[in-house]
Image (cartoon, rainbow, N blue to C red):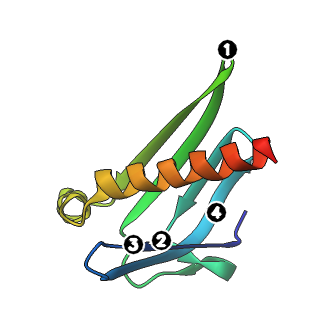
Amino acid sequence: VGGLFRTLMRAPDGSEFPTQGVFLEIDAPNRLVFTDAFMPGWVPSGKPFMSAEVTFEEVGEKTLYTARAMHWSAEDKQAHEAMGFHDGWGQSLDRLVKLVTEDMVD
């Protein structure tokens, strides 16, 4: 908690959308909560955009993944959607599934 969270989303056209902030909660392997409202050392960021909660819940032999983005304003939410938020997070999940599946096979 309080450690650096950093993400780089890269669009098909090569444009990049870097984000960083801190972890607010780490409950491995069940839940992660992070925000861009603060930088490490709890220094306020210049322009907070969102906080996010990601949960992993065992359901039978599968894992239910839930990601929730909480934006600071309706305008921030609309801007995030315009950047391809839904597709981007979906693609990231596909990569995570591939990574975890490959590790299980090895």
Residue 46, image x, y percentages: 41, 85
Which numbered mark, 2 or 1, is in the foreground of this view? Answer: 1
What distance separates the C-alpha of mark 1 from that of mark 3? 38 Å
Which residue is tagged 4? 23
Q: Is residue 28 left or right of residue 11?
A: right
Q: Earlier in the sequence, mark 1 or mark 3?
A: 3
Say which amino acid is labelled 4. Phe
Which residue is tagged 3? 48
Which numbered mark, 4 or 2, is in the foreground of this view? Answer: 4
Say which amino acid is labelled 1. Gly
Q: Secondary structure at mark 1?
A: loop
Residue at x 22% of width, y 57% of height = 81
Say which amino acid is labelled 2. Ala
Q: Earlier in the sequence, mark 2 or mark 3?
A: 2
Query: In the rendered structure, are the residues bearing label 2 and label 3 in contact, judged by CB atoms less than 8 Å apart?
Result: yes
Residue 72, image x, y percentages: 32, 60
Q: Earlier in the sequence, mark 2 or mark 1?
A: 2
Which residue is tagged 1? 60
Which residue is tagged 2? 37
Q: Earlier in the sequence, mark 3 or mark 4?
A: 4
Say which amino acid is labelled 3. Pro
